[in-house]
Image: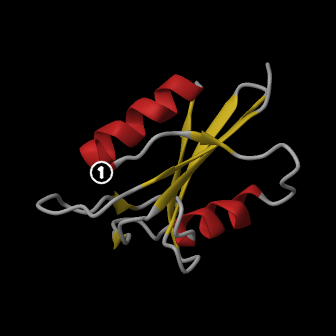
């Protein structure tokens, strides 16, 4: 399977609840994650993850998915019309997570 690395901006979200993440927290704990401004999708060898960040680099959660399409579908469910177009991370980029944060801050993004 080929490696896929994509980013998409997330616009303002209003009138929707924040996701609740509980994985890795003590039993029964819940943590409200902030809404992201960018989503990074990384896939390689059958593993696919969505990482979410604010433009200042604050981590907003991650999820595992079986396929790239499943990850894209999940992002669409979570962010609806606020989800921007998926853009490939340049192959020359050595730090996709850093690129995603820079992309979120870019005035031309």
Q: How is the image coloured?
A: secondary structure
Residue 38, how many percent across, how many down?
49, 59
Q: 40 above or below 57?
A: above
- For residue 29, say whether it is visible: no
Is label 1 in a helix, a strand or a loop? helix
Left/right placement of residue 8 relative to residue 10 reads right
- For residue 74, say whether it is visible: yes
Q: Nearer the viewer, residue 89 or 50?
A: 89
Q: Nearer the viewer, residue 71 or 29?
A: 71
Left/right placement of residue 86 relative to residue 79 reads right
Q: Nearer the viewer, residue 33 or 102?
A: 102
Answer few, some or many: residues within 10 Å of disc 1's Cα (few below 14, many 20 plus, some between 14 and 19).
Answer: some
The residue beneath circle 1 is 82
Residue furthest top in the image: 1
Residue 15, how many percent across, how many down?
11, 61
Q: Quadrant of the N terminus?
A: top right
Residue furthest bottom in the image: 56
The picture quadrant where one finds residue 105 is bottom right
């Amino acid at each position: 399977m080929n490696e896929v690395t994509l980013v998409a901006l997330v616009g303002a979200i209003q009138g929707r609840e924040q996701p609740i993440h509980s994985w890795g927290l003590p039993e029964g704990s819940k943590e409200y994650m902030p809404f992201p401004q960018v989503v990074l999708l990384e896939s390689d060898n059958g593993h696919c993850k969505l990482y979410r960040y604010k433009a200042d680099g604050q981590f907003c959660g991650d999820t595992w998915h079986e396929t790239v399409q499943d990850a894209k579908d999940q992002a669409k469910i979570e962010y609806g019309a606020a989800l921007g177009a998926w853009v490939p991370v340049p192959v020359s980029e050595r730090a996709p997570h850093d690129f995603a944060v820079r992309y979120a801050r870019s005035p031309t993004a």
